[in-house]
Structures are given as structure tokens and as C-alpha cells.
Amino acid sequence: MGSKKLMENAAKRNDSGEKMEEKIIYIAGLGLIGGSLALGIKRGHPHYKIIGYNRSDKSRNIALERGIVEEATADFKEFAPLADVIILAVPIKQTIDFIKILANLELKENVIITDAGSTKFEIVKAAEKYLKHKPVQFVGSHPMAGSHKSGAIAANVNLFENAYYIFCPSSLTKSSTILEMQEMLSGLNARFIEVDAQEHDKVTSQISHFPHILASGLMEQAGDYAVNHQLTNRFAAGGFRDMTRIAESEPGMWTSILLSNAEAVLERISDFKGRLDEIAEFIDQGDAEAIWHFFDNGRQKRKEMEIHKRGGVDSFYDIYVDVPDRENVILEILELLRGTSLVNIHINEENRDDINGVLHISFKTEADLIRAQKLISQNTTYNVYLD
């Protein structure tokens, strides 16, 4: 379909014959995030025209086959002039490169340009520099949701449900920009929040970026240690597994994130080094009281944080089931949950043979959680409890 035909088809009418609002949404990057955004927008506004860019043929073809977008291109410049909203769902460096390209294109007046990057200050700064003389709106965005899966094939209309969707205003953000974005993204069922770009990067350096460094560092340390202590690999379960899960994240993405938020991340590393030195000194001195307070302080702070509330990167609903060490017990529970959409499932074991395991199941929606709790409680004698 050519550009002219695309514009003609953008106009729709409702069942009463009234002309509906016309919007063309252009999403650059049809991977997990971009594809899921497209599905969410379409759910809330089925009459919007959603078009996309992706460099690889594979993701473009999947996006077209799944109906994620109506048209797709391998030339970023091709669809940009048609769009009412442009969403840059590509890596941080490429986002900035695309902002530079947009600065030299003839765009619709008052087009909203936004992104989906994990860091915000450099992107907002680039937009203010390169787009300042154009009649456009720009607001930085960070949808805080993810998955171990990637690509258009993994796009999920429920990916952002109950997750924080952060807006970081710029000097090019008008009073109506964020309201328009919230309306367009209403089908995501996300939790919208507005944060200064620098503050966003400082906060995420602590709760997202540094933990990824720590997880990969622990894996590197354990891997080296296992060379001479082979039981390390066999016993690496429970807490170690949970702490290092995020070490499986995509290296290229995290390289880009760290380099675009270097100052804040380096400050967090330096701070943590001091905390490690402090607990090392307590151990060296045999100071049992100080060690006790170290662990108690961590426990209390975790209780005070909103970790267990909905929202954030892993915005899931969790259920826990005490299960005996018996053949097919997991299959028995999964059979009960046939037809329920699961996000993740694993056993929280404690490396002991004399206690039950704990089956940990994550759901994306509260409705699925309630259904699962009812089914398991009614059909088994296992203890079922929520996080």
C-alpha cells in the first residue's frame, strides 16, 4: 500500500456514520516493546492506523502477519512525514540517531515524538537540541515492562498492564502532550507517572541498572569459582538463582544503558563498594551485633519498600503453592490451570529433602490470579498463598 493510499484509509467512520478522529501512529522498532505498544494502542483505539519500521525482514513480516501493524517499511524516513505520533522503540543510540534524522524531515505540524528507552536524560537532551526549531512536541517515555523473550513474535497486548509508564517532559512538551499520550495509550492499562529525566536516570541506576551489574558479577565470580569447586554449579539454586536471573539479559542493550547513564551508575558502584568494605570489617572483627544489625536493617528496609505492590518492571501477580516431593505434582497443578495465561513458573527450593518445595507461579492479570487460587484451593489439599 502506498503512502497516498495509507492517508486515504486513515479516515474511518463509526457505526452511526460519524467521522472518527484520525490518527496515524508510527512505531520505529517492532520488537517486544514496539510490538506490544502497537497491540495495546490498537486495543484502545481500533480505528487508529498503526504503521511501523524495522530493519530486519523477519520482524517486519511477523508484525504484518500478526496484524501488529498495517504497513511496515525498512526505510525509517518513508513513513515519518505521515505520522501524528512517532514512537522510537529502538536502542538508545539509534533513538538519538533517529531524532537527528527527524530534525531534517518535513513532519506534520505538532506531531508528537516520543521514545521507549530505559534511560532518559541523554535522549531528552538530544531532542531539545536537534528538534528545537521544529513545530513538534517531544516527551521522553519509559514503559517499565519486559520479558526474557524478544522480537515481534513475543509482542503481548498485556505486557504493560499495571506496569509504570513513565513520562519525562522536555522543553518541547506542551501542557496537552502527556494527556494526549495517555489517551492514545489507554489500551495498555498501564500506570502513568511523570518524572524529571535526570531523576529518572538516578532512580533506575539504583533499582535496575546496578542490580544487572551485580547479577552478572555474581555469575562471573561463581563461574570462576566453580572451576576448582564443582559443587558450586550443583548447589546454585534458591536465593542465588533468584538474585542472578537478570544476568541472562541481552548484553547489547545493557551496554547501551550503562554508557548512557554512566555517572549515576558509577556513583552506585562506588557506594556499594563502601558497604561491602563495611560488612567485611564487621566479619573480620567478629562483631556479631553489627552483623545482626546489617541483616536486620536490610530486612526492615525491604519490608518498607513497595516491592510487593503492583507496578514496576516485573508487574506480575504471584501465587505460591506448597507442593510435596511427588511425581507429576507440577503437571497436576498445571492441568488445573489449563486455559490460564501464565507469565512464569518455577520451584523455590531450599536444597533440603525434608521439606516441601514452593511452586511460584506468576500471572499478568489479577483475574487470572484469583481464578488460579480458587482452582488450586478447591481441587487440592496444598497450601496456597499470595505475595
Image: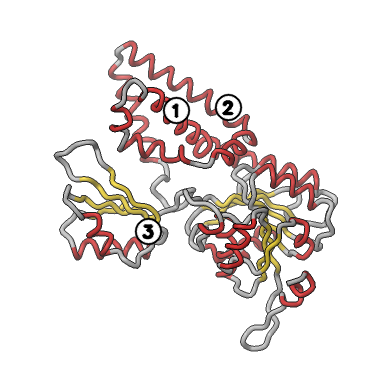
- Residue 220's label in the rendered image is 1
At which x and y percent is residue 330?
24, 54
Whichever of callouts 1 and 2 sits on the residue coming sooner in the sequence is 1
Whichever of callouts 3 and 1 sits on the residue coming sooner in the sequence is 1
Whichever of callouts 3 and 2 sits on the residue coming sooner in the sequence is 2
Instruction: Tell me if 174 is positioned left or right of 251 in this view.
Output: right
Q: Nearer the viewer, mark 3 or mark 1?
A: 1
Q: Residue at x 42, y 25 (%)?
A: 221
Q: Secondary structure at mark 2?
A: helix
Instruction: Tell me if 38 is positioned left or right of 291 in this view.
Output: right
Q: Residue at x 31, y 26 (%)?
A: 230
Q: Which residue does the numbered mark 3 point to in the structure image?
A: 342
At which x and y percent is residue 380?
17, 61
Would you say residue 262 is visible in this rendering? yes
- Residue 58: quadrant of the picture: bottom right
- Residue, far top: 285
